[in-house]
Image: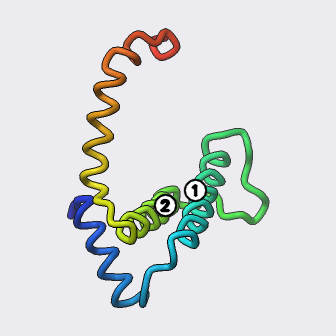
Amino acid sequence: METTIKQAQQQVDEWIKTIGIRYFDELTNLGILMEEVGEVARVMVRRFGEQSFKEGEEQKQALSDELADVLWVLLCIANQTGISLDEALQRNMEKKTNRDFERHKNNTKLNR
């Protein structure tokens, strides 16, 4: 089953209000977001980069789980600050398309 961004925001909001009691404050969620992004980085540099997993460290750390944790906190921050990520993403896509329409095509570094 696919979930839209709007539905995801609603699901997280419902979970927070029924199971999570309430949202953490915005600065706490910012800190949690930074922690979760760090966990994504840890998995990425070990799986795709030059750093290796330590002995006994879980080598099958699920990147998908870590990315979902980042998304969860982003959805929380958006909800508590009154931002529709669906609308924000559409505006951002338009901005990037208008700004970068020819930019990447003409970037010799990308066309190797």
Q: Work out whether residue 3 or residue 1 is closer to the camera in this orientation and state it.
A: 3
Query: How many numbered marks appear?
Result: 2
Q: Pick out the residue farthest to the front.
A: 81
53 over 56 or under it: above or below:
above
Q: Where is residue 63 in the image (x, y as percent from the top left)?
A: 52, 56
Instruction: Determine the image quadrant of residue 106.
Output: top left
Q: Pick out the residue farthest to the right.
A: 55
Taking the spot 26% from the left edge, 54% from the top edge, the residue there is: 86
Q: Work out whether residue 24 or residue 36 is closer to the camera in this orientation and state it.
A: 24
Instruction: Determine the image quadrant of residue 3.
Output: bottom left
Instruction: Determine the image quadrant of residue 91.
Output: top left
* Label 1 or label 2, whichever comes before in sequence order: 1
Taking the spot 61% from the left edge, 41% from the top edge, the residue there is: 48
Label 2 residue SS? helix
Q: Within 10 Å of the Cα at label 2, are there few (<14), some (14-19), or many (20+) other Cα atoms?
A: many
Taking the spot 57% from the left edge, 62% from the top edge, the residue there is: 36
Q: Where is residue 67 in the image (x, y as percent from the top left)?
A: 48, 57
Question: Which amino acid does the dot numbered 1 rest on?
Answer: Val
Taking the spot 44% from the left edge, 80% from the top edge, the residue there is: 23
Q: Is residue 34 left or right of residue 2?
A: right
Q: How far apart are marks 1 and 2 (CA)?
A: 6 Å
Label 1 residue SS? helix
Tell me, yes or no, whether the two marked residues, 1 and 2, touch with CB atoms within 8 Å: yes
Q: Position of residue 84 (x, y in %)?
A: 28, 59
Q: Which mark is residue 63?
A: none
Q: How is the image coloured?
A: rainbow
Question: Which amino acid does the dot numbered 2 rest on?
Answer: Val
Residue bearing the label numbered 2: 70
Q: Which mark is residue 37?
A: 1
Q: Within 10 Å of the Cα at label 1, are there few (<14), some (14-19), or many (20+) other Cα atoms?
A: some
Q: Position of residue 104 (x, y in %)?
A: 40, 18
- Quarter of the image that includes the N terminus: bottom left
